[in-house]
Image: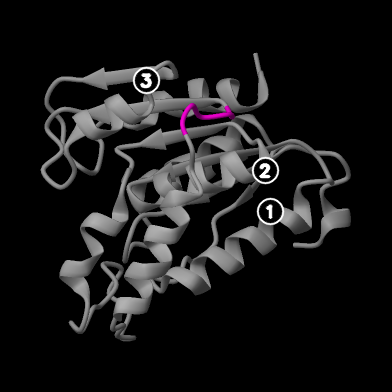
């Protein structure tokens, strides 16, 4: 996709979670909804490296390339929620955050030195180092409160991976939808596709 392909059209960037991929169910639901009902909105779902510095550089480069072509909105799940917040603050972009990771620097040390495989079943293995932790903690420090952009937090109290209360506190003052039950995958996501698109782009 080239910048001139947008021609002023809105761009929705979907950012998947740690060791996930653009093949995730929520990503596919959003892609199909846009295709069916909002064909004027461009959809982009990059494969995000688990290596912190590589992920940050590639995502910043992606937004820089397209941010002047038309409106940009972000949707981020889990670790993708952190990346959406990082990019949202850096470029003043609206973002919808689904069970987001608030402080990834607190949990990625548990992955350092271990052989990691993507949940999508790819054969490639990853191995994080302390440098990934250090860079993540540095990036976290660049996100200051109060938040300067516009966010919608969608969380489920049944999230077995991340404590929803961390996100509830971090995004205090922002739009929040916190449901009982559910899990980290955010059950019954499909009905939220249209409201998210409306939130990001003021679509009716």
Q: Nearer the viewer, residue 125 or 132?
A: 132
The numbered mark, 1 or 3, whose residue comes first in the sequence reads 1
Q: Is residue 22 visible?
A: no
Q: Give the residues in magenta.
A: 145-149
Residue occupied by mark 1: 63
Q: Position of residue 185 (x, y in %)?
A: 24, 43
The numbered mark, 1 or 2, whose residue comes first in the sequence reads 1
Nearer the observer: mark 1 or 2; the answer is 2
Q: Residue at x 21, y 58 (%)?
A: 107
Q: Position of residue 129 (x, y in %)?
A: 30, 81
**Quarter the C terminus occupies:** top right
Q: Is residue 190 visible?
A: yes
- How many labels were placed on the picture? 3
Disc 1 and disc 2 in contact, CB within 8 angstroms = yes
Other-residue count near label 2 (Cα within 10 Å), few / some / many at <14 / 14–19 / ≥20: some
Nearer the observer: mark 1 or 3; the answer is 3
User: Main structural element of the magenta stretch: helix, strand or loop?
Assistant: loop
Structural distance between the alpha carbons of marks 1 and 2? 8 Å
Q: Residue at x 56, y 25 (%)?
A: 150
């Amino acid at each position: 996709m080239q910048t001139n392909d947008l021609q002023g059209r809105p761009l929705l960037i979907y950012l998947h979670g740690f060791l996930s991929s653009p093949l995730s169910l929520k990503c596919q639901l959003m892609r199909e909804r846009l295709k069916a009902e909002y064909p004027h909105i461009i959809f982009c779902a990059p494969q995000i490296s688990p290596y912190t510095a590589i992920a940050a550089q590639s995502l910043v480069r992606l937004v820089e390339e397209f941010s002047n072509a038309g409106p940009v909105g972000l949707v981020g799940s889990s670790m993708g929620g952190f990346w959406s917040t990082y990019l949202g603050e850096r470029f003043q972009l609206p973002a919808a955050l689904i069970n987001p990771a608030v402080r990834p620097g607190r949990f990625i040390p548990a992955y350092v030195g271990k052989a990691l495989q993507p949940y999508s079943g790819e054969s490639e293995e990853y191995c994080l180092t302390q440098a990934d932790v250090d860079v993540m903690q540095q990036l976290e420090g660049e996100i200051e409160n109060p938040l300067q952009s516009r966010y919608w937090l969608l969380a489920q109290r049944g999230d077995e991976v991340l404590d929803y209360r961390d996100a509830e506190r971090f995004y205090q003052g922002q739009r929040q939808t916190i449901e009982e039950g559910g899990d980290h995958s955010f059950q019954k996501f499909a009905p939220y596709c249209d409201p998210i698109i409306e939130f990001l782009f003021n679509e009716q």
